[in-house]
Image: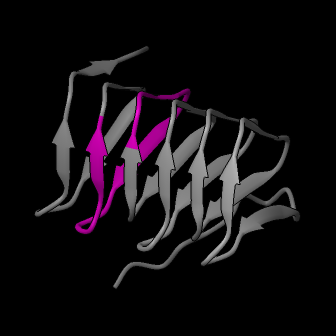
């Protein structure tokens, strides 16, 4: 099992399991999603979608780690990590990409410099 780290910014936001949000989310600090969001996410830090978390909408972040499900496009300025339990249905754009065996990606991948 992999360890998860937040950035050194010191603060983060958590959408807990069994929490459902319908609407766009904007965060200046790291964001962990263990619940469900239907809407777009714009985050100035790292987005972590936990193993039971899901997002239906586009995600824009500094970096991201996906263990759950995303249906929508991901635009990440730095690194994107898709863990073994990840399911992504959408296009991804990032600088560096890490994909564990058994992660699922349905979409196009674009590397940026």
Q: What is the residue that sits farthest to the bottom in this orientation?
A: 1
Image point (87%, 64%), residue name: 10
Task: Specify whether 105 is left or right of 3.
Answer: left
Task: Specify whether 9 is left or right of 51.
Answer: right
- Image location (x, y in percent) of residue 22: 68, 46
- Image location (x, y in percent) of residue 26: 79, 37
Image point (85%, 41%), residue name: 28
Where does the N terminus fall, quadrant-wise?
bottom left
- Image location (x, y in percent) of residue 52: 44, 73
In this rendering, the answer to whether 73 lies above or below 68 is: above
In this rendering, the answer to whether 10 lies above or below 44 is: below
Task: Specify whether 28 is left or right of 36.
Answer: right
In this rendering, the answer to whether 100 lies above or below 111 is: below
In this rendering, the answer to whether 75 lies above or below 11 is: above
Quadrant of residue 48 within the rendered picture: bottom right
Image point (82%, 49%), residue name: 29
Nearest the eye: 108 or 111: 108
Where does the C terminus fall, quadrant-wise?
top left
Task: Specify whether 1 is left or right of 59.
Answer: left
Q: How is the image coloured?
A: one colour
Quadrant of residue 105 within the rendered picture: top left
| Chain part drawn in magenta | 71-89
- Image location (x, y in percent) of residue 16: 68, 75
Image point (56%, 42%), residue name: 63
Q: What is the residue that sits farthest to the left in this orientation?
A: 102
């Amino acid at each position: 099992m992999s360890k998860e780290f937040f950035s050194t910014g010191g603060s983060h936001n958590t959408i807990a399991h069994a929490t459902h949000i319908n609407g766009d989310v904007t965060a200046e600090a790291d964001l962990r999603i263990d619940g469900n969001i239907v809407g777009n996410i714009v985050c100035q830090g790292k987005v972590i979608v936990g193993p039971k978390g899901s997002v239906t909408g586009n995600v824009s972040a500094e970096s991201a780690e996906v263990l759950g499900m995303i249906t929508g496009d991901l635009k990440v300025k730095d690194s994107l990590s898709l863990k073994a339990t990840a399911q992504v249905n959408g296009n991804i754009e990032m600088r560096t990409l890490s994909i564990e065996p058994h992660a699922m990606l349905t979409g196009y991948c674009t590397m940026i410099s």
